[in-house]
C-alpha cells in the first residue's frame, strides 16, 4: 500500500531518500542537486512529502513558493522507478498547490535526465524557457503546468 505523508526534509525518514536522490542525480548529470534545495524554509504554502510503500520510505518531493501564483517542485525522487510512486507524489503536490491558491507549477531538471523529462511531459507539463538561475544554462530543462 502506498501512502503520502507530509514531513520535513531534515526528518530522519527523509535523509536516506534525499541521499538516494543526490546519488542518482550525480550518476546521471554529474551534479547532486543539493545546492538547489539548501534554502528550504517552512512556509504554509510549501510542503515536503514522503511516499511510504508498505510503511517504508520509497520517495519524496517538495513544493515551495516562487511568488503568490507560482510554486516550484523540488527534490522529486522515487526509490523504485516505474511503480507509480513518482506519479502519486506529483499528484499530491499538484493538489496541495491548487489548495494553496497557486495558478502554475514550474520545475527544473537536466536535459540529460531523459527519464525525468519524459515523466513531466507525460504528466502534462510543457517545456518553457529557463527561469531564474537556470537562464543561459543549456544543460537545464525547465517545465511548467497551469493549474487553472
Image: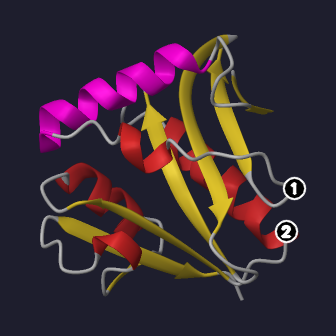
**Quadrant including the N terminus:** top right
What span is colored magenta in the figure?
Answer: 14-30
Q: Estimate how packed mark 1 is, as few (under 14), some (14 to 19) or many (20 or more) residues with alpha carbons within 10 Å.
A: few
Q: Up-down: is 97 above or below 15?
A: below
Q: Which residue is drawn at 81% across and 61% down?
A: 45
Q: Earlier in the sequence, mark 2 or mark 1?
A: 1
Per the image, the residue denoted by label 2 is 100
Residue 132 image offset from top left, x and y in percent: 40, 76
Q: Is mark 1 on a helix, strand or loop?
A: loop
Q: Is residue 127 magenta?
A: no
Q: Quadrant of residue 49?
A: top right
Q: Which mark is residue 44?
A: 1
Q: Is the magenta stretch mostly helix, strand or loop?
A: helix
Q: Residue at x 75, y 66 (%)?
A: 97
Q: Estimate how packed mark 2 is, as few (under 14), some (14 to 19) or many (20 or more) residues with alpha carbons within 10 Å.
A: some
Q: Which residue is drawn at 33% across and 30% down?
A: 22
**Quadrant including the C terminus:** bottom right
Q: Up-down: is 108 above or below 87?
A: below
Q: Residue at x 28, y 61 (%)?
A: 118
Residue 89 image offset from top left, x and y in percent: 61, 44
The answer for how far apart the CA atoms under marks 2 and 1 are is 8 Å
Relative depth, front residue between 4 and 21: 21
Q: In which quarter of the image is residue 20?
A: top left
Q: Up-down: is 72 above or below 27?
A: below
* Residue 92 located left or right of residue 75: right
Residue 80 image offset from top left, x and y in percent: 40, 25
Q: Do the residues labelled 2 and 1 touch (CB within 8 Å)?
A: yes
Q: What element carries label 2?
A: loop
* Residue 44 located left or right of residue 130: right
Instruction: Select label 2 or label 1 by which is in front.
Output: 1
* Residue 132 located left or right of residue 98: left
Residue 38 image offset from top left, x and y in percent: 50, 41
Amino acid at each position: 500500500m502506498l501512502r503520502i505523508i507530509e514531513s520535513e526534509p531534515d526528518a530522519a525518514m527523509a535523509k536516506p531518500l534525499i541521499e538516494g536522490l543526490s546519488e542518482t542525480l550525480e550518476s546521471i548529470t554529474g551534479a547532486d542537486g543539493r545546492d538547489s534545495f539548501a534554502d528550504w524554509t517552512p512556509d504554509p504554502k510549501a510542503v515536503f512529502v514522503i511516499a511510504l510503500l508498505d510503511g517504508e520510505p520509497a520517495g519524496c518531493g517538495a513544493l515551495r513558493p516562487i511568488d503568490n501564483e507560482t510554486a516550484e517542485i523540488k527534490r522529486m525522487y522515487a526509490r523504485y522507478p516505474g511503480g507509480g510512486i513518482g506519479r502519486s507524489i506529483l499528484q499530491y503536490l499538484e493538489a496541495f498547490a491548487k489548495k494553496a491558491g497557486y495558478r502554475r507549477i514550474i520545475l527544473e531538471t537536466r536535459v540529460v535526465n531523459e527519464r525525468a523529462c519524459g515523466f513531466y511531459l507525460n504528466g502534462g507539463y510543457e517545456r518553457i524557457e529557463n527561469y531564474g538561475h537556470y537562464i543561459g544554462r543549456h544543460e537545464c530543462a525547465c517545465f511548467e503546468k497551469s493549474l487553472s
